[in-house]
Image: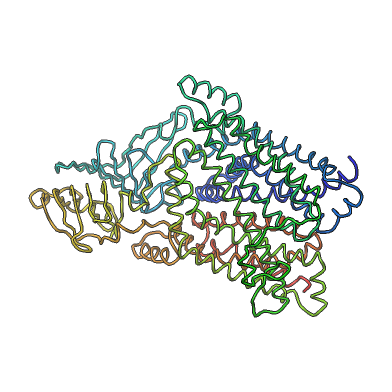
Amino acid sequence: MRILDRYVIRQLLMPFGIGLLVFTFLFIIPEFMRYAEDYISRGAPLGTVVQVVIALLPMALGLTIPMSLLMALLVAFGRLSADREFVALQACGVSMRRLLIPVGLVSTLCFAATLYTLLVSVPASNQRFREITFKILASQAEGEVKPRVFFDGFPNIVLYVREVPATGGWDGVFMSDNRGGEGSVIYLAKHGRIVIDKEKQTVEIVLDETMRHAADAAGKYEVATFDRLVLNLNPESMFPKDGPKKGDREMTIAELRARADEVRKQGQFPHNQLFEIHKKFSIPAACLVFGLIGLALGATNRRDGKMASFVIGVAIVFVYYIFLWLGQSLTKGRVLAPWLAAWLPNIVLGIAGIVFLKWRGRVADRPMRVPLPAFVKRLGLVTTTGRARFFTPFGTLDRYVAVTYLRMLGLSALALCSVFYISAFTEHTEKVLKGAATWTMLLTFLLYESPQYFYYIIPLSVLLATLVTVALLTKNSELVVMKACGISLYRVALPMVAAAVVAGATLFALEQTVLGPANRKAQSIRHVMRGGSPDTFDVFTRRWVIGADGDIYHYNYFDHRERRFNGLWIYEFNDDMTRVTKRTFAQQASFVSDATWQAEHGWTREFDAAGEPKPPPEGFIPFDHTRKVFEPAALFTTESPDPDFMSYTQLRDYTERLRASGLDVVKQQVALWRKLSFPFVTLIMTLLAVPFAVTIGRSGAMAGIGASIGIAIVYWTTISVFAAMGAGGVMAPALAAWAPNLLFGAGALYLLLTVRT
C-alpha cells in the first residue's frame, strides 16, 4: 500500500475500535444487568457469568461491526476535513475515487469479519448462551422464587414464601397445587426446597413440617400433617427432551436449509428460513455499502459539516434496519421474494451511496448541513452564522463551555439512544413477523421501555460529554489559554458540574414518576411477546394477592370497574403463617363499600389451634349471601409490589411495612438505597471525568470516548457485584448500594486534588 492508503487506514482504526467497544457495550448492557447480577446473587461461579457475557458478544458484533465502520468513516474523514488535510489531498490531485482504495480495503475486512461472525460465531454462541442459562436455571431453580412474591413458574403450582435464606431453600412456604383442579390442595410448610437430579431428570419439591389442606367447592375438606413431604413435578418443565431448542438465528446454513425442507413438506412456504439464509450474507455486505456512504458524508471541507454528517450517519443505520424489517414483513406476506427482501436495504442504500459519492466528487467544498425550519430563524433562536443563540445570564466562558458540552451531550445521547432502539427492534421484530406479537405491541413496548433507556443513557452521555469536551479544550490548547488568563480548571468545569446536577435530578425524577410503571408495562408486553401469558403482576390478570395482615386472596377473575370477583378463595393464617385459621370460598363477591364485601354462594370453614377443621355447625358455615369485612378495594386495583416497579417513596413505605411485620427486608433495603444512590452517578462521573480528561493530554475526543466507555464498564460491573453481595447478606445494604459511588468518588477526589488546575 502507498503512504496515503496506510495513513487513511490508521485514521480509521482508532474510531472504529472505540465505536465497536461503545456500540457492543451498549448492546449487552440490558442483558448484562438482567443476567449477571441475578446469577451472582444466586452464587453462580464468576466463570459462568463471564461465559454468559462472552456468549452475548457475537450476536452484538454481527450488528455493531457495520455500524462502527460507518461511524469510523464519518469521524475519520470529518477530522481530516476539519484539520484541512482533505483540502491538501484535493490540492495534490487525490480524488474521491482514489480514496475508495483504502476505504474499500477496510470495508472488505469488516465484511469478512461480519460474515464469519454471522455464519460461524452467532449460531454457536447463541446456542451456548441458551444452554448456559438453561443449566443455571435448572440447577438453581429455587432461586427463581422471590420472597413475598407469588411464583407460578412450575405448571399448575403457585408458590409464596416469606423468606429465602442465603443458605438456600425457603422459609414459610405456602403452595397451591392445582394439578387436580382449581383450588383443590394447598400446603403450608416451615421449610421447603427444590431438588433436581440432572442425570435422572427428576424434579421434586421437598416440604418439611407440612400441613395439607384439600377442599372442593361443595365444602368437603381434609387436613393431613407430614414431617416431610416430597412432591414430584413434571420433569419436562425443567428438562425438555431435546434440551433448549434452536431458533432460526441459532441454526447454521445447512440446518436452515434442512428446516426449510421440513416446512415445505408441511405444505408451507419457508420464508423465515430463506430470509435468514440471505440475511447472513446481506448484513456483512452492508459494510461495503456503508463504506460508500461514510466516505461521501464524512469528506467535507467545512468544520461544521462533520456534526451534521454524524447525525445523518445515525439516521442511515436506522434506515438500513427499517428496510430490513420491512422486507422481512413483505416476504412473509409473499409480496417480495426472501432474497430480495434481505438484500433490499443494500440495494437502496448502495444506489444512494453511489449518488452521494458522485455528488460529493463534484461539490466537495460544500458542507453537509441539516436545514433548520424557517420559524426557528424567525424567532431569533439562531445567529446569522446558523449557530444556536443562548439567552443566559452567564458569562462568555460559561456559554462557550456550555454550548460545546451540550452539543456533545446531545450527540452522545442520540448515538446511544439509537443503539438501544436498534437492539430492541432486532430482538423483538422476529416475534412480530412470526405472529407472536403485533407492530402496535412492539411500538408500545418501545414507548414503555424508553424511560429505562434514558435511565441508562443519561449517566453515560454525561460522562461522554464531559470527557470529550475537556479533551477537545485540551487538544485545541484552549484550556491552556484559559489557565493563562487566570481561570482555573475548577471554574471551567462549573457549567459541566451544574449540568450533572440537573441530570442527577432528572434520574431521580424518573425514579419517582414514570420509570416504575413504565417498566411494569414493558415487562408485561415483553412476557407476552415471548409466548407467555400476561404476568401475575398486572392488576387486570393477576390472580393472587397478599393482604396487609398476611391473608392470601385468590380469584379466577376480577372486574376492576365493577369491583366484582368470580371464584374467590380467602386464606387466613396465624401470626407466623404456620397454620390456616379460616378459609372462605365464594362463587361471586363484590364490594358494597370500601372494605365491606357482599359474598354469594359459598362457605366459611374455621380451624382449631392444632390446624384441624372445627366440626359443623360452628366450624362450617355455608351461605347464599353474606357481608364480610376484608381488605379495601385499593389492594386489588393497585399494582403488586416489586422494587423494580416502585418509586423511592413507594418502596420505602413498603419496606417499612415488611419490617414492622418482622420479615427480612435486606433485598428491599439494597434496592431502596440504590434508588437513592444511583442519581449521584452523574455528579461522580463528571468530577472523575474532568481531571481524567486533562491527564489524557492532547489525544482528543476519541481518547475521551474510549476512556469513558472503560470507566462505564468498570462502574456497571461494580454496581452489579456489590448489589449481589448486599442481596446475599455479605455486606450492609447501604454500603452495598453506595460502595460504587464511594470508590469512584474517592478516585475523583484524588484526581481533582492532584491535577494541575
Left or right of 94, for residue 527: left
Q: Residue furthest right?
A: 92
**Which image quarter: residue 415?**
bottom right
- Relative to residue 304, is residue 509 drawn left or right? left
Where is residue 364? Give x, y as percent: 80, 52
Residue at image point 56% right, 26% down: 256
Image quadrant occupied by the C terminus: bottom right
- Asked if residue 624 is positioned above or below residue 391 in the image, the reply reads above
Q: Please, which residue is most extreme toward the left here? A: 617
- Along the line of sight, which residue is nearer the eye, 512 or 351? 351
Question: How many dots with numbers?
Answer: 0
Looking at this view, is 181 or 555 the one in front? Answer: 555
561 relative to 150 in the view: left or right: left
Quadrant containing the N terminus in the rendered view: top right
Image spot of residue 711 (x, y percent)? 67, 58
Query: Looking at the rendering, which quadrant does residue 341 occupy?
Result: top right
Measuring from the top left, give residue 189's x and y in whole percent.
Answer: 31, 47
The residue at 82%/72% (across/down) is: 480
What residue sits 79% from the left and 72% below the top?
Answer: 756
Seen in the picture, residue 371 relative to 446 is either above or below; the reply is: below
Residue found at x 70% / y 40%: 351
Q: Nearer the viewer, residue 235 or 121?
A: 121
Residue 147 at x, y = what percent?
39, 53
